[in-house]
Image (spheres, rainbow, N blue to C red):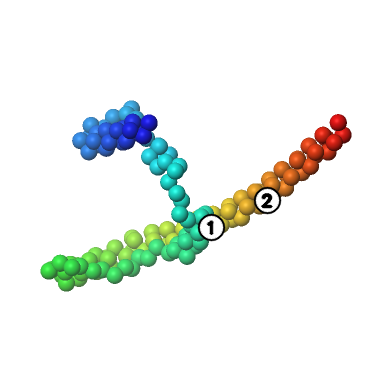
Amino acid sequence: MQDTKGSAVESLYQAVMEQNWEEKEYIPTMQELVPEAVPHIYSLDDEVAWLQTNYDVLYYRPIKSNRIVGVLLIFFRKIVRKLMAFLIHPITCDQSTYNVHVASTLRKMEIELSDQKSLLEDLQELVEKQKKELEGRK
């Protein structure tokens, strides 16, 4: 099965690269491409904690160049950055705000899921108790 998926991905890649793309061709889903056997290194709590600490999208980043004409490139890139600031800065602010809301929503969902899990465990214990009482009456 894995060989068919691999060959399907390769043929799809070749078709896209050759621009012979047809919409009716098979498109593998992410679940097919990334097997469930791949270990997840970080827990949900770790991922949400990372989101909460790294939510900010910076508009200003250092400009570097290792080329011979690097000084000129850096100079022109800084000019372009200043000219484009009125377009880019609001977008980065909006993205940072969105990231904050996503991180807080995920944290709330994680808390709600843990509450639901503990409630489910309590209900399962209650069901087991009820089953034992029913069996004891018979």
Badge 1 density bin: few <14, some 14–19, many ≥20, Cα 10 Å = few
Q: Mark 2 points at which residue?
A: 118
Residue 48 shows in the view: no
Q: What residue lies at 29% left-to-right and 63% top-to-bottom? A: 84
Question: In which quadrant is the N terminus drawn?
Answer: top left
Question: In which quadrant is the C terminus drawn?
Answer: top right
Residue 6 shows in the view: yes
Residue 45: assigned label? 1
* Callout 2 amino acid: Ser
65 relative position to 130: left or right = left
32 relative position to 129: left or right = left
Q: What residue lies at 26% left-to-right and 68% top-to-bottom? A: 63
Total numbered labels placed on residues in the image: 2
Badge 2 density bin: few <14, some 14–19, many ≥20, Cα 10 Å = few
Task: Return the disc, 2 or 1, that comes first in the chain's sequence.
Answer: 1
* Residue 8 spot, x, y in % from top left: 31, 32
Q: What residue lies at 37% left-to-right and 65% top-to-bottom? A: 58
Closest to the observer, 15 or 78: 15
Q: Is residue 106 above or below residue 93?
A: above
Q: What residue lies at 45% left-to-right and 54% top-to-bottom? A: 41
